Amino acid sequence: MGPYRRSRVMRKTLKGEMMDQMSTDELTDLLESTLENALEAWKADAYGCIVKLATAGRPFTADDVHAMLEGRWAPGSVHPNVMGAVFARARRDGIITTHNHYRPSVRRDAHRRMVRVWEGV
């Protein structure tokens, strides 16, 4: 039938004339762009939390950022590695630094693994 065949599920679950006329590929593109926008918003939110913690003048870890983000975003809405990328950006931007201190994570899903302690510059 070709790559633009509409799925039966889409026809049954989506309402409205415009959505009914969308191909599966168009819907996939729309969903992917929505996810990319949400990821960028999450990263901006996490970066803002890091800046706030850095200006507070106390050492902090990724656990503190996770705690600030809790309730704002659905659990598991982004891959856990994304947090590391946000910290790397903050370090490159000169917002935070580390002196190679670590402490056990307090997050249950981290299983007490060692996490880096950061400080504002």
Image: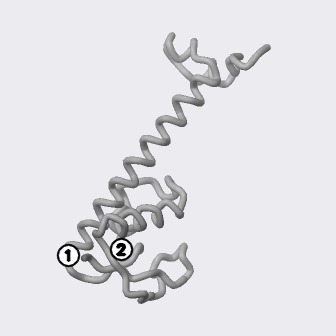
Amino acid type for the residue under numbered disc 1: Ala
Which percent across, then down, holds residue 8? 70, 20
Which numbered dot is residue 64?
A: 2
Give me the residue at 53% from left, 63% from top.
Answer: 81
Residue nearer the viewer, 13 or 114: 114
Which of the 4 image quarters holds residue 57?
Answer: bottom left
Q: Residue furthest right?
A: 1
Give me the residue at 37% from left, 58% from top.
Answer: 71
- Quadrant holding the C terminus: bottom left
Give me the residue at 68% from left, 18% from top.
Answer: 6
Residue nearer the viewer, 97 or 2: 97
Which percent across, then down, holds residue 77? 50, 53
* SS state under label 2: helix
Amino acid type for the residue under numbered disc 2: Asp
Which percent across, then down, holds residue 50? 31, 67
Q: Which residue is mark 1?
A: 56
User: Is 80 situated left or right of 37 in this image?
Assistant: right
Which percent across, then down, holds residue 73? 40, 54
- Quadrant holding the N terminus: top right
Mark in front: 1 vs 2: 1
Q: CA distance from mark 1 to mark 2?
A: 12 Å
Give me the residue at 52% from left, 29% from top.
Answer: 30
